[in-house]
Image (spheres, grey):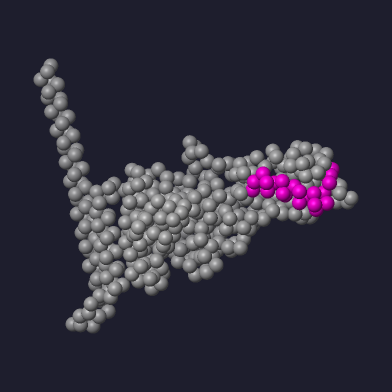
Amino acid sequence: MKHNHVLLALLVAALLSGCASRRSIEEQAYRDAMRDMAREQAQAAARAITSSQTAGQQRQLSAYEQWQLRVTQRIGEALADTACCRFNTAISIYDITSGQSVYSLNENVRMRPASTEKLVTAISVLDLLGPDYSFNTRVLASGTLRGGVLNGDLWIVGAMDPLLSAADLRTLCQSIRRAGVQRVEGSVCVDLGLKDDNQYGWGWCWDDKNSTLSPLLLDGKPKFTNSLASQLKAAGITLKRTAVKTGVLPAAAVELTQLQRPLQEVLEPMMKQSNNLYAECVFYQLSPLTGRRAPSHSDIARLINGVIDRAGGNSYHVQVADGSGLSLYNYQTAATFVSLLRYIYTKPNAYQALTQSLPIAAVDGTLKNRMASTAAASNLRAKTGTVDGVSTLTGFTTCRTTGHLLAFAVLTNGVRTGSQGRALQDIICTAISE
């Protein structure tokens, strides 16, 4: 019996040793392949740089050409790290100033973007609605208003303002009173037609603690209607019926007042803190452009696909499932991200609004603790993305060597931990910022 135990132990040890050896061989093969690829890319870059030279003439590489070769080599060395053989990587780096690609790897491969999908949402809304757009929660009356009495219904049309607070609701009710409404003989009604009645996004995980989506939010939660009647009464408005109804705003309704919220106030926390609810609220600001009541995520996605195509991307090869990146069904490519960044750069006001909202390396937001004491610090502005198995980064940085503005996307899928993807991103972003 003891001999059997000894034999079994030896067999297990041999199997484990064999597995370890195979892993070691696989990892070494990957490192060798990545080093070969890096060498080939550097040689190809050198050939491309010198291809326009007259035969027989020799010249030294310019500072820009030397920088480009260094970047290619640094990325190749980073990809040769053992951990990189265990996950998929897509990279696209473009020099906006000189109008040329700096580096690409798998840039047309579909990848899950995680929260970098918020960048797609932000650019699309800035393009279609403009940086001066505001969320607009409207109050209207159907019927006649005489002597302070509304013989009809009081309507609130939801704008999906995620920052609407209890203080805002009090202010709104007080402005209704100042508009001359002292008593409502009809009903208090809300119109929730900005989106469909799905409370969660398409492809969201059932076990995530996600915010409920509603066109009327109060402090980020769907409790607006629960507080509305009491706040109207507190403002000095008498209600014949206290129950709040849901319906469709009559075409003849007359506006009494509104509560506006500048897009930038929502965009900055959405991007810097990667707030998912805020991103979904921004996403559904495109609803009126669909021409449909209560549009679905797919109706909004068609509008965003149009922006992608105009930017020079190809919407056929990507999938927009939501506004935040929470959905498992979102797919983007590194090339698409860079196309969108290049596109928004051509619109100065929108570009300024976007870059103002992005996290800054070593300064704030989700990049506050990254790339400190490097050329990227206080320079690089980019959106991060993290869900289980996914780590992404895409945005802008200025190269210290050339002074050129670069757009980039580094997407990693299949990472065991987010730190693996972040480490690769930080190496690449530091290299292109130097």
Residue 17: give x, y in percent of width and height: 16, 36
- Residue under the point 39% across and 49% down: 391
Horizontal arrangement in the rendering, residue 40 relative to residue 141 (left or right) = left
**Quarter of the image with the N terminus in it:** top left
- Outermost residue, front side: 373
Residue 281: give x, y in percent of width and height: 58, 50
Residue 401: give x, y in percent of width and height: 33, 69
Report which quarter residue 63 is drawn in. Answer: bottom left
- Outermost residue, top side: 1
Horizontal arrangement in the rendering, residue 170 relative to residue 266 (left or right) = right
User: What is the magenta range?
Assistant: 164-186
Q: On screen, 1 above or below 103? A: above
Question: Is residue 161 shown in magenta?
Answer: no
Which residue is at the front of the view, 76 or 237?
A: 237
**Quarter of the image with the C terminus in it:** bottom left
The answer to whether residue 8 of the structure is visible from this angle is yes
- Outermost residue, right side: 147
Q: On screen, 309 above or below 210? A: below
Residue 244: give x, y in percent of width and height: 74, 40
- Residue under the point 86% across and 49% down: 148
The answer to whether residue 111 of the structure is visible from this angle is no
- Residue under the point 69% across and 38% down: 226
Q: On screen, 58 above or below 30? A: below
- Residue under the point 13% across and 28% down: 10
Q: On screen, 389 above or below 304? A: above
Label total for image? 0
Question: Is residue 179 shown in magenta?
Answer: yes
